Amino acid sequence: MSAARPIVKIANADWEFDEIHRLNHQTFAEEIPQHDRGASRRLVDQFHPDNTYVVAIHDRRIAGMLAVRSTRPFSLDRKLPDLDAHLPAGRDICELRLLAVDPAHRSSALLPALLAEAWRHIVERGHDLAVISAYMRQLKLYAHLGFEPFGPAVGSRPDVMFQPMMLTLERFAPRAPRLFRRERTGEAPVGRFLPGPVTVHDDVRRAFAREPRSHRSAGFLEELSRAQELLRDLTGARHAEVLLGSGTLANDVVAGQLSLELTRGLILVNGEFGERLVDHARRAGLRFDAIERSWGEPFDLKEVSARLVDVPRPDWLWFVHSETSTGVLNDLDGLRGVCRQAGVRLCVDAISSLGTTSVHLGDVYFASGTSGKGLGAYPGLALVFHNHDVRPAPARVPRLLDLGLYAGDEVPFTHSSNLVSALVTALDRIDLPRRTVEMAGHALWLRRRLECLGFDVVGRAAEPAPGVVTVRLPSEISSIDVAMELERLGCEIGAFSGYLRERNWIQIALMVGDISRATLSKLSILLLEAADRVRSRHAAQATDRHIG
């Protein structure tokens, strides 16, 4: 026998399928008498057209195989008609079948290699539960892999019986590194899942790399005008001002404008960035009240509506549309309605919702945004939207915060042509209807997956924000340690902001451009592995302290 290592792959060649039929007959007709022997010594599986075969090839022979099947009914459906009654609800199920290894290779590492490749295939297709009919004589092997028995034994012959077993993603993921002895150092990183800076498209990079231009030049003024036009088209706002600065600056500008009116307002708080609006308002000397809810809890529109007509009656309401800290999307349309009915002017922090969901700003008083995050450009530009004329207020607000200067006929201060060029390119690329549907679908899928895996997703009772998913970790697992472990595994998530550290939360942002379901599936598994490693490490440290 050759000493060359077998090649493990997904079967796709005619000769490989012929070899599969040979090994199928050898295993399930000759060795395990599940089927009658045939003169051709070839056995074609009844579900062959639907099977994906993971095979190990050695000297142009199939030394081992495992079939993965996603199409219902499974073979186990026929043996166990009430199959779903035995399985946890809400799962994406596949069936594993025809696990066979040639006797000459059963003492090698071929089986772990087969399972590792099947595992990658299953993960990429988003499955989180596998079922199998385990040969009764191999139950210890399946139990070692993490399979759990369910239901009665099945089979058409008393001497060849099979035990239905299932394997959940959360049970198998922590075992996978040890079983497969995987080395991740050569694997490509899974990606960055941070709320900013986001991954930008190559076209945006090229636009940013252009030679800088003066903010007084005709070329820059034309590009700035184009950026404003695209922002107006995106939001429906009459005016869109582009300032050099962050989203924080945009909110300071809004607070500065509200300070000119000497009116009273109402601020809604159900997360970190709602609390920051309160801080903006205090620093600007605004008079206001607040409705505060627990982080992640939705607002009650009836309560808000009642407060808008109560004494002292507010003149404006300010809230965060997409509360990044909790992954909650607050009800813009609902709040728009109650404000319109009460004659109250609406102000919106749309920093994390622009580009991640539909945001109509055509009737708001002020709204803030930023060039990064969902718009897919570089951070560094503050955006302020309004639907009424504003004038400079030289005696009332600092020059940098004076929105009236930006709304005038010329650019008031030095600007960045590079950032504006990048923003225009990013805005030109946005296909918002497609992006919002995809992003919302990805976020919903990831939330459900993480909940199935036992993670506590923040804001379950509220409308989920499409751009971010926040997870509350148990106290025995450090969020910082999990994030650092994930980084070693090739994946960056949010965990280091003060409000996340204080609550032992982690955050997965989906504002990173094109994301595949396979990537999110890998991310969920890496998160399981990282949490398991951190839990094990903490337990070992606690044991050492106890012994010491």
Image (spheres, helix red, strand yellow):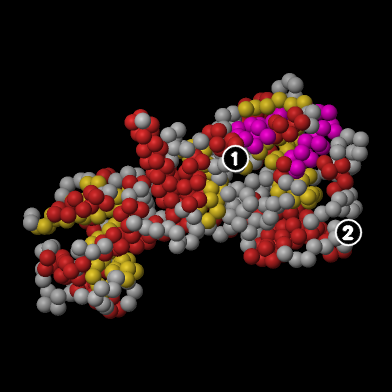
Image quadrant occupied by the N terminus: bottom left
Circle 2 Cα neighbour tier, 10 Å, few/some/many (<14 / 14–19 / ≥20) = some
The boundaries of the magenta stretch are 249-276
Relative image position of residue 359 (x, y in whole percent) = 66, 48
Residue 338: where, in percent of width, then height?
Answer: 68, 34
Find disc 1 in the rendering and name its residue: 497
Label 1 and label 2: CA atoms lie apart by 38 Å
Residue displayed at 71% across by 44% down: 247
Where is residue 204 drawn, in percent x and y? 68, 62
On the question of residue 17 being in view, the answer is no
On residue 216, the disc is 2
Secondary structure under tag 2 reads loop
Q: Amino acid at mark 1?
A: Ser
Point out residue 346 in the picture as x, y percentages from the top left corner: 73, 37
User: Could you tell which of marks 1 and 2 lies nearer the N-terminus?
Assistant: 2
Is residue 202 toward the left or the right of residue 483 in the image?
right
10 Å crowding of disc 1: few (<14), some (14-19), many (20+): few
- In the image, residue 259 sits, relative to residue 311, either above or below, namely below
Which element carries disc 1, helix, strand or loop? loop
Question: Residue at image x 83%, y 62%?
Answer: 213
Considering only vertical position in the picture, is 410 above or below 11?
above
- Is 74 part of what is drawn in magenta? no
